[in-house]
Image (tube, coloured by chain):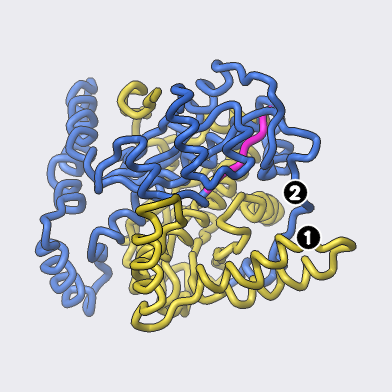
Chain colours: A blue, B yellow
C-alpha cells in the first residue's frame, strides 16, 4: 500500500468486527515497530501482545470496558522502561566489538557516554550535579542538558517508544487492519496485570481488528495548519 | 512508495548532499505529520521550519555543529507545549458545535473532561487532589490516574508529538529524502533561539536533505526480537 495512502486512511477505529486477525500481520507490524529510530539506539521499549483470554478480560476492564478494547481481536500494550539500558548497552557493545572495524567513536559512546546519561541513583544526585555543572558551563557554550528527575528520563524513553508505536499502527493499516491507540486506562491496574515494575510506563494500549461499519465515530478535525507550522 | 519499503529504508542519515530540497516535499511531509493520532485530539505540537540563515547558523551551533544539522538543507524543530490546550479545545468545540448533529458525548468530553485533565495550577494542587482521590477510588474500581507534576504532563504531550514526528520522517523518506532525528542539542539555547517559553519542550530536531554517499554511519542493530516482544 502506498505510504501516503496509509497515513491518510489511518483513523482511530473504535469498534471492530469479529473477524479473526492473522497473527502474521501482527508479527509484521511488530517488525515495523522495531525499525523506528530511537534515542541513542537504546530501544527502551517492550510490546505486550495479549494472548491469554483471562488477561485480556482483565485489561478490557482496566480500559473501562471501552469498545476499542472490548471488541478488539488483538490487544497490544506498549511499554517504555528505564531498567533495560544496561542489558541493551551490553548487547550493542557486543555488536560493535564484533564488527570488522569497530569505530572508536561508537565504542566510546556506548562505553562512556551512555552510562553517564542513563545512570540514575535513587536520589538523583548525579542529575543534580550534572544539572549544576551544565548550567554553569552552558553560560559560555552549548552543552547537552541533564534530565532532572525520573519523569524527565521517562519523557525520553516514552518519546522514543511512541515513534515505534506509530510505525506499528501504520503497519497495521497498511495490511488492511484498523486500530485504536488508547491512553484511557487505569495504569496502575494495567501494570499489575502485566507484572510491570516502577521503572515502566505504559505508553499506550492498541486495540486491533478489522473495522466495523460503525467503527469510526466522526470526521477528522485538525487545528488550522498555520497555527502549528511556523516558518522562522 | 510502498509503506514497508519506506519503513525498511528509513535510516538516520547524518550527512546530506548540497542538493536543494523541494519545499513542496517538506510541506507534504508536514501534512502527513499533522494526521498522526494524538491524545484526545488536542494536538499539542508545533513545527518550526527554519528559513532564516542566521537562525540556522545559531541552531547548528546549538546542535554542537553535528553533521546531521550542519549539512542539512532543511531543518525542522518539533515542539510539544502545554499552553495551547485552551485554544485547541475552543477550536475543537467550535468544530463540534458546527456539526449537523453534534454528539453530546463529544461536547461533554471537551466541555468538561478536557479542562479537568489539562488544567494545571502553579502548585499542582489539582493534581494532588486528583491523585489522592483516584488512589482511594482506585482501590475499588479502575480509574484514570492523575498525572503528578509538570514533567508527567510533558510526557503525554511529547509522546503524542513523537507520533507526528514519525509520520514526518517516514513521509520524507517516501519522497526520496533522508533525515536524521536529533536529541543531541542544547535545549536551553534552542528554546531561546526559537523564542519558546517554559511551557514548551523541544521534542527533536530533524535534519533533512538528500543522502550523501557517506551519510550512513553503519549497519542497523536491533535488540533481539524475543527480548522486547512478550506474548502474555
> Visible in this render: residue A128?
yes
- Chain to which the residue tagged by mark 1 belongs: B
- Magenta residues, start to end: A177-182
Q: Quadrant of residue A134?
A: bottom left
- Chain to which the residue tagged by mark 2 belongs: A
Q: Are marks 2 and 1 on the same chain?
A: no
User: Which quadrant does the C terminus of chain B fall into?
Assistant: top left
Residue extending farthest to the right is B100
Task: Tell me what residue is drawn at x 20 percent, y 53 percent.
Answer: A117
Report, in whole angstroms, how far the alpha carbon at label 2 lies from the one at label 1: 9 Å
Please provide percent x and percent y for residue B7. Answer: 54, 32
- Asked which secondary structure carries label 1, the reply is loop
Q: Quadrant of residue B13?
A: top left
Task: Tell me what residue is drawn at x 29 percent, y 39 percent.
Answer: A196
Q: Count the marks: how many?
A: 2
User: Which quadrant does the N terminus of chain B fall into?
Assistant: top right
- Using the image, tell me which numbered label, if any, was put on residue B103: 1
Question: Which-is-in-front pick, marks 2 and 1?
Answer: 1
**What residue did someone put label 2 on?**
A217
Q: Is residue B144 magenta?
A: no
- Asked which secondary structure carries label 2, the reply is loop
Task: Tell me what residue is drawn at x 60 percent, y 26 percent.
Answer: A73
Residue B99 appears left or right of B198: right
Residue B19 appears left or right of B16: right
Contact between labelled residues 1 and 2, with CB atoms less than 8 Å apart: yes
Residue A13, above or below A121: above
Task: Tell me what residue is drawn at x 23 percent, y 25 percent.
Answer: A95
Q: What secondary structure do most residues of the magenta stretch adopt?
A: strand
10 Å crowding of disc 2: few (<14), some (14-19), many (20+): few
Please provide percent x and percent y for residue B74. Answer: 55, 57
Amino acid at each position: 500500500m502506498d505510504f501516503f495512502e496509509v497515513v491518510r486512511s489511518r483513523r482511530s477505529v473504535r469498534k471492530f468486527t469479529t473477524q479473526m486477525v492473522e497473527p502474521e500481520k501482527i508479527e509484521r507490524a511488530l517488525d515495523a515497530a522495531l525499525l523506528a529510530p530511537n534515542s541513542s539506539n537504546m530501544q527502551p521499549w517492550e510490546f505486550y501482545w495479549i494472548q491469554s483470554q483471562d488477561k485480556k478480560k482483565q485489561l478490557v476492564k482496566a480500559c473501562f470496558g471501552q469498545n476499542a478494547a472490548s471488541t478488539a481481536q488483538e490487544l497490544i500494550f506498549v511499554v517504555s522502561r528505564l531498567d533495560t539500558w544496561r542489558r541493551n548497552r551490553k548487547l550493542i557493545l557486543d555488536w560493535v566489538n564484533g564488527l570488522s572495524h569497530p569505530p572508536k567513536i561508537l565504542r566510546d559512546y556506548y562505553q562512556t557516554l551512555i552510562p553517564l546519561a542513563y545512570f540514575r541513583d535513587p536520589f538523583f544526585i548525579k542529575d543534580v550535579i550534572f544539572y549544576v555543572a551544565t548550567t554553569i558551563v552552558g553560560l559560555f557554550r552549548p552543552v547537552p542538558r541533564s534530565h532532572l528527575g525520573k519523569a524527565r528520563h521517562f519523557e525520553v524513553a516514552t518519546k522514543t517508544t511512541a515513534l515505534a508505536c506509530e510505525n506499528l499502527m501504520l503497519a497495521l493499516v497498511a495490511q488492511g487492519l484498523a486500530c485504536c491507540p488508547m491512553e484511557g486506562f487505569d495504569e496502575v491496574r494495567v501494570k499489575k496485570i502485566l507484572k510491570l515494575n516502577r521503572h515502566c510506563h505504559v505508553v499506550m494500549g492498541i486495540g486491533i481488528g478489522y473495522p466495523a461499519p460503525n467503527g469510526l465515530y466522526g470526521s477528522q478535525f485538525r487545528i488550522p495548519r498555520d497555527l502549528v507550522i511556523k516558518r522562522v
